[in-house]
Image (cartoon, rainbow, N blue to C red):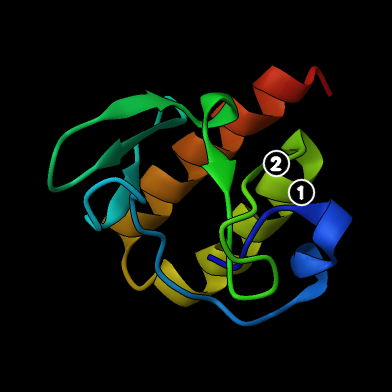
Amino acid sequence: MSCPVSSTGCTKSQNPCYWYHRSCGGSMEISTEAFMRCERCYHSGHWKEWSFSCSRHPLHYEKADARDFLRNSSFVTNLYAANSERITIIKQIMRKLLDEMDL
């Protein structure tokens, strides 16, 4: 997913990349309950608790807006949804994010 921080202009980017945990360099994953976890050290928390940085604003970590996070999540859906199992998982994540936005 591209960086979900709109104040830096990153959400307009269509350049997907992997997300890594700053503390240990492990890859990040997201659950169907919108919790993120580092695959290496297992540090986890709700996505709203995380801050994000990228090459446009290196070492400048900011929280993501819910709409921006959802927008980036929907973009990655097109890249990741290769089979019905993955599509089901992505739908669960999207549904959870929409529920949290009270739409």
Residue visible at 33% across and 57% down? 86
Query: Type of residue at label 2?
Result: Ala
Image quarter of residue 33: top left
Residue 101 in percent (x, y) is at: 76, 23
Residue 64 in percent (x, y) is at: 70, 41
Q: Are marks 2 and 1 in contact (CB under 8 Å)?
A: yes
Residue visible at 64% across and 53% down? 60
Quick one: 12 or 58, which is closer to the camera? 58
Instruction: Please identify the residue farthest to the front as the structure is shown.
Output: 59
Under circle 1, the secondary element is: helix
Query: Type of residue at label 1?
Result: Asp
Label 1 sits on residue: 68
Quick one: 67 or 40, which is closer to the camera? 40
Which quadrant does the C terminus fall into?
A: top right
Quick one: 17 or 89, which is closer to the camera? 17
Number of residues whose C-alpha sits closer than 10 Å to that of mark 1, classed few (under 14), some (14–19) or many (20 or more): some
Residue 40 in percent (x, y) is at: 12, 47
Instruction: Please identify the residue farthest to the bottom as the structure is shown.
Output: 15
Total labels: the figure holds: 2
Residue 76 in percent (x, y) is at: 54, 66
Left/right placement of residue 99 relative to residue 103 reads: left
Under circle 2, the secondary element is: loop
Left/right placement of residue 93 relative to residue 51 reads: left
Left/right placement of residue 86 relative to residue 38 reads: right
Quick one: 78 or 26, which is closer to the camera? 26
Label 2 sits on residue: 64
Vertical side of 98 occupied by 16: above or below: below
Nearest-to-viewer mark from 2 and 1: 2
Residue visible at 24% across and 30% down? 43
